[in-house]
Amino acid sequence: MVWVDVTLNGTTRTGFLPVMDHRNKPIPEPDAFQVNTALMRCMTKTLALFGLGLYIYAGEDLPEGEPEVAPEAKKAVQEPKVDANLAWFAQKMKEMVTIATTKDELREFWKANLPQLDILKTENPDLFKSVLKTFKDAQSQMEQA
């Protein structure tokens, strides 16, 4: 029996799978190759618990690639993704403030994410200001406590 733990976005799923032969019968004393094969199958099964690879289950061979688009249209399509990623990053930064228990932890978290925060500051200044305000508010609450 093999098992795999996969953690994705803070959620952990565990998958179990017996080591089987080509007839789907358990192998009492498997060799390293058979164990490795079972581990890879188990990992695939566990990743599927997160919904990865659903297009295969739906009967598609491969996910469809993006259709050919003119370069000007590609820019228009890609910009919302950046905004969505920045919004997600800002939301997670605000959520992480609640985890910090000291001002030092808060500063370390800010410093660890400084490159992404610089991008947020240039790409979406209003969103950056809201994150900065959240951090400053948390810092002042820690000073009062």
Image (spheres, rainbow, N blue to C red):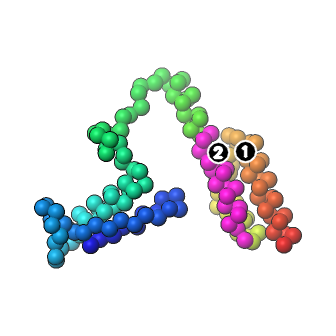
Q: Rounded to the nearest whole Å, what is the CA distance between mark 1 and mark 2?
A: 7 Å
Which sits earlier in the primary sequence, circle 1 or circle 2? 2
Q: Height in image: 108 above or below 56? A: below
Q: Are marks 1 and 2 in contact (CB under 8 Å)?
A: yes
Q: In the rendered structure, find residue 127 and report the number of the disc placed on it.
A: 1
- Which residue occupies the foreground of this view, 54 or 124? 54
Residue for badge 2: 87
Q: In the image, is 133 to the left or to the right of 15?
A: right
Q: Residue at image x 67%, y 61%? A: 96
In the image, what residue occupies the spot 65% across and 57% down?
113
**Image check: 43 left or right of 143?**
left
Res 24 quadrant in image: bottom left
Q: Residue at x 79, y 53 (%)?
A: 133
Would residue 10 appear left or right of 23 to someone viewing this image?
Answer: right
User: What's the magenta bit mostly, secondary-structure-wise?
Assistant: helix
- Please identify the quadrant where the N terminus is shown: bottom left
Q: Is disc 2 placed on a helix, strand or loop?
A: helix
Q: Residues within 10 Å of mark 2 (few under 14, many from 20)?
A: some
Q: Position of residue 132 (x, y in %)?
A: 77, 53
Structural crowding at the residue carrying mark 1, measured as other residues with C-alpha within 10 Å and reported as few (<14), some (14–19) or many (≥20) = some
On the image, which quarter does residue 77 sit in?
top right
Residue 38, position as x, y percentages in the image: 25, 65
Element marked by disc 1: helix
Labelled disc at residue 14: none
Residue 66 at x, y = what percent? Answer: 42, 31
